[in-house]
């Protein structure tokens, strides 16, 4: 796997069969893509493997100006974007019509990547961006179709690189057979246009810089709390600029309470982390609670 990851940075353009053979070791579900049907109206081209190869071909057709890292992440984004469909695909009634659908395949696929691809040779920052594309690849058209506001674009931009997901979704739409393809491509164009206006690259740093200057000398916990609440207010539509969110500074306590939630399987080092970095925190342990309630 590490050899192929390195070759992707050098401009190698493998076909789907090669990608599945290599990455199927970490994610065996990839071998089931060819056995997973799709709705004939939404995906007239056929099963998930056929679709994924078509999307890959489309991506290779316009993958020219991106950095080697971007190119590798986009190729992996295409490979993995429908990886959860074999698990969730089923027949269901949608608006009175029987369809073949794959509900929540985006979020389930994202979660699967977090476990299967960690420590497999892909830098964490790259894995995070690939996970973002997989988990949000339907967001571009949904934001437009549902006529979402600026806050929704900002919310999505904190999960995924907006330019990457637009490129992936363009390849996803051109790499299929469906009657409304042109309309769907218009939605992606509109998504990119709204993104430039409402959630351009680096917008968060502009907000953070504004509050960092105003709160110089205040505790880090206070700064983090105010900044987080300001972003929450933006995403909920309560404010439209960092200046409008300054009132939050006067509502938050100087020393806000802090809750740290550790997540990981048994033996992964949660207790060691607490002992090393959180010795001044009160610990609420599920193991201790179980022992107290039910005994040894």
Image: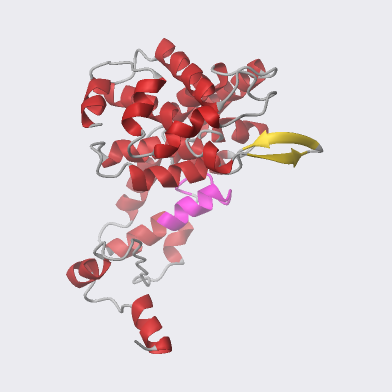
In the rendered structure, the answer to whether residue 269 lies left or right of residue 156 reads left
Above/below status of 166 relative to 290: above
Residue 218 in the image: x percent, y percent? 28, 63
Q: Residue at x 70, y 17 (%)?
A: 179
Above/below status of 198 relative to 41: below
Can residue 245 be spotted in the picture?
no
In the rendered structure, the answer to whether residue 166 lies left or right of residue 183 reads left
Which one is nearer the viewer's eye here, 20 or 205? Answer: 20
Residue 27 in the image: x percent, y percent? 38, 39
Can residue 220 be spotted in the picture?
yes
Which one is nearer the viewer's eye here, 118 or 150? Answer: 118
Magenta residues span 228-243
- Screen quadrant of the C terminus: bottom left
Does the magenta run of residues contain 24?
Answer: no
Does the magenta run of residues contain 241?
Answer: yes
Q: Residue at x 65, y 19 (%)?
A: 44
In the rendered structure, the answer to whether residue 32 lies left or right of residue 70 reads right
Q: Residue at x 46, y 36 (%)?
A: 134
């Amino acid at each position: 796997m590490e050899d192929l990851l390195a070759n992707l940075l050098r401009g190698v353009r493998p076909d789907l069969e090669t990608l599945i053979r290599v990455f199927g070791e970490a994610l065996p579900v990839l071998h089931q893509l060819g056995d997973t049907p799709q709705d004939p109206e939404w995906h007239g081209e056929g099963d998930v493997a056929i679709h994924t190869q078509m999307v890959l071909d489309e991506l290779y057709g316009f993958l020219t100006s991106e950095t080697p890292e971007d190119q590798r992440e986009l190729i992996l984004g295409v490979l993995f974007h429908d990886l959860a469909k074999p698990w969730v695909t089923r027949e269901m009634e949608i608006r009175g019509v029987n369809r073949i659908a794959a509900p929540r395949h985006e979020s389930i696929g994202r979660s699967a990547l977090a476990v299967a691809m960690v420590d497999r040779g892909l830098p964490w920052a790259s894995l995070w961006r690939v996970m973002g594309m997989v988990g949000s690849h339907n967001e571009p058209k949904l934001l437009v179709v549902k006529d979402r506001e600026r806050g929704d674009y900002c919310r999505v931009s904190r999960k995924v690189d907006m330019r990457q997901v637009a490129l992936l979704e363009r390849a996803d739409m051109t790499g299929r057979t469906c009657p409304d393809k042109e309309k769907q491509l218009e939605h992606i164009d509109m998504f990119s246009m709204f993104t430039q206006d409402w959630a351009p690259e680096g917008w968060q740093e502009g907000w953070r810089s504004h509050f960092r200057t105003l709160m110089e000398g205040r505790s880090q916990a206070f700064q983090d709390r105010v900044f987080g609440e300001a972003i929450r207010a933006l995403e909920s539509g309560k404010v439209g600029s960092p200046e409008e969110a300054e009132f939050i500074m006067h509502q938050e306590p100087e020393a806000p309470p802090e809750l740290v939630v550790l997540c990981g399987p048994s033996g992964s080092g949660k207790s060691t982390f607490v002992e090393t970095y959180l010795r001044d925190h009160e610990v609420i342990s599920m193991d201790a609670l179980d022992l107290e309630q039910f005994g040894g």
